[in-house]
Amino acid sequence: MNYKKLHESAFVLDSHCDSPLKLYDGIDMSKKNEQGHFDFIRMKEGGVDASFFAIYTSNKIEPDAATRKALQLIARTYDAVEQNEDKVGVALSVEDALELKEKGLGAIFLGMENGLPIQKDLSLLRLFYDMGIRYMTLTHAGNNEICDSCATKEKKWNGLSPFGKKVVKEMNRLGMIIDVSHISDDSFYDVLKYSKKPVVATHSCCRAIADLPRNMTDQMIKDLAAKGGVISVTRDLAGLMSPYGICVNSISPGGFDKGELPQSFVEDYAAETPLGRMGRIGEDIKGPALLLASSAGDYITGHNLVVDGGFSIWK
């Protein structure tokens, strides 16, 4: 079986797509855009059956502001789907996604990146679940009331907080997936200890390739798998190659150039890849580059994963 037939026969899931940040800025997902790597046209062309839209909030803002921003991003996502009912639909379950595929439509799931918007209040966690959130990344580039981040030198909880343990239990009860990307190693092992359900790393890389706290060790990946979990290895070269002085803005999170991203997002990202620099494939970066294909990140171009005209895989 060649790669095209394999791709067509599979259910292809993009486990972390940052496009809600662009919806917030008013981008039209109904047409093929010059900015970014994702829109509903290229989702279809690239053979992506479902995508988790990331409801991202920075740890640098106050909880009230985070809650408001999360609500706005959720609302913008629902608006975009409603305006493109001939292309996509919201999925709240596996069955929804499979049904949408049968109809020739893409499935849009919602995942929350950072638990800050729930404000140490399990009722807000339940409310966000009712709004469609089906996974939550416990924190991002800072410690919060749930757990410690991989990006901070000083840890607040040395793992999950007492409230974080309650969050894990309630997420298990609700059926909301726990995402361990961005969290500290101690937090990761606390999640494995206290969760009764499998957990996922929706957009992580391998520390054996790039020795950064953002990435997972081989043992962590094995331990994740032993509990029934999975890792989606992101093809963002910054996560793979920052120890070598390379951080590629042309395929940064969400597929946006540095200048197109909110400053808080750029700062959070830089905190996790401190050795990186900004550059472009085919311009600043010459020679071979390592690229891992995965279902993580806002990555589909519809052109056999051609990235910035520099190179592609599968060809």
Image: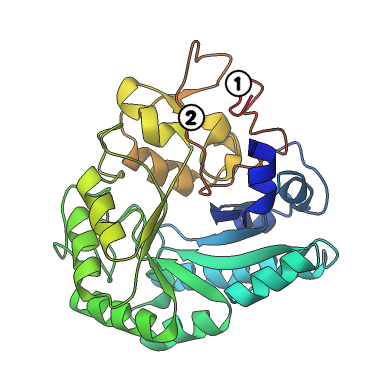
Element type where label 1 sits in the image: loop
Position of residue 103 relative to residue 211, above or below, is below
Q: Is residue 48 left or right of residue 32?
A: left
Evaluate whether residue 149 shows in this view.
Answer: yes
Asked if marks 1 and 2 touch (Cβ < 8 Å), the reply is: yes
Residue at 60% x, 21% y is 311
Q: The C terminus is located in which quarter?
A: top right
Q: Earlier in the sequence, mark 1 or mark 2?
A: 2
Q: Nearer the viewer, residue 228 or 74?
A: 228
Q: CA distance from mark 1 to mark 2?
A: 10 Å
Residue most toward the right? 86
Identify the residue under disc 2. 291
Label disc, if present, on residue 311 of the rendered structure: 1
User: Callout 1, which amino acid?
Assistant: Phe
Query: Which x, y percent locates residue 178?
Result: 38, 69
Query: Which x, y percent locates residue 210?
Result: 30, 32
